[in-house]
Image (tube, helix red, strand yellow):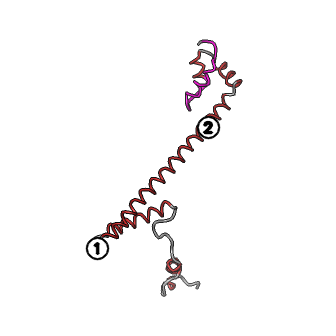
């Protein structure tokens, strides 16, 4: 196909991927780069490529969102199964031997909180802790003030 640029040139151009170039199209079809540029301009290759890439991104995002939702559902089903086994273990066994059930229940609670976007550990700091830290930081022990030089 020498000397004439066909309509499949755009498909070839898109198929080249990110390192695509008009020069590569010119070499493939045996024409000058200038002929490819003219053909690309006339057929609006840039706009068409932009639209194709946007549609591909949207499709990819949609697949990722679906995969993420399916993963969350799988995790929830697993947590429900573990929770039901933990409850059964706590009911059937005395407290001394049912500790595995209690640990499983604790794990389920932590994981459910994480899935809900909550913290599974205590992350808040009490006012008392902050006050104590600030007092220790800013108050100078008695006698330590004598170390400063006098203004005499």
Q: Which of these two is toward me, 3 or 57?
A: 57
Name the quarter where the C terminus is drawn: bottom right
Q: Which of these two is toward me, 140 or 130?
A: 130
Where residue 55 sits in the image (x, y, percent)? 61, 37
| Residue 14: in magenta span | yes
* Residue furthest top in the image: 2
Where residue 74 sits in the image (x, y, percent)? 45, 53
Residue at point 51%, 50% (across, down): 68
Q: Is residue 91 left or right of residue 37?
A: left
* Residue furthest right in the image: 42
Identify the mark at residue 4; answer none if there is no mark: none
* Residue furthest bottom in the image: 142
| Residue 54: in magenta span | no
Depicted 120 relative to depicted 44: above or below: below
Using the rendered view, name the quadrant where residue 102 is placed.
bottom left
Residue annotated with mark 1: 96
Between circles 1 and 2, the one closer to the viewer is 1
Using the rendered view, name the quadrant where residue 15 is placed.
top right
Residue annotated with mark 2: 55
Depicted 34 relative to depicted 91: above or below: above
Q: CA distance from mark 1 to mark 2?
A: 59 Å
Where residue 59 sits in the image (x, y, percent)? 58, 40
- The magenta stretch spans which residues? 2-22
Depicted 97 relative to depicted 48: above or below: below
Q: Residues within 10 Å of mark 1 (few under 14, many from 20)?
A: few
Using the rendered view, name the quadrant where residue 17 is placed.
top right
Depicted 78 relative to depicted 45: above or below: below
Q: Is residue 29 left or right of residue 98?
A: right
Q: Secondary structure at mark 2?
A: helix
Q: Is residue 45 left or right of residue 95?
A: right
Name the quarter where the N terminus is drawn: top right
């Amino acid at each position: 196909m020498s000397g004439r640029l066909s309509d499949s040139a755009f498909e070839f151009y898109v198929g080249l991927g990110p390192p695509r170039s008009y020069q590569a199209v010119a070499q493939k079809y045996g024409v000058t780069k200038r002929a490819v540029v003219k053909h690309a301009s006339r057929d609006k290759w840039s706009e068409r490529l932009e639209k194709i890439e946007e549609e591909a991104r949207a499709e990819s995002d949609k697949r990722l969102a679906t995969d993420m939702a399916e993963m969350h559902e799988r995790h929830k089903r697993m947590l429900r199964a573990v929770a039901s086994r933990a409850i059964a273990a706590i009911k059937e066994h005395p407290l001394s031997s049912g500790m595995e059930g209690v640990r499983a229940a604790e794990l389920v609670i932590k994981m459910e909180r994480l899935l809900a976007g909550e913290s599974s550990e205590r992350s808040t700091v009490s006012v008392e802790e902050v006050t104590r830290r600030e007092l220790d930081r800013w108050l100078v022990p008695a006698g330590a003030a004598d170390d400063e030089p006098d203004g005499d």
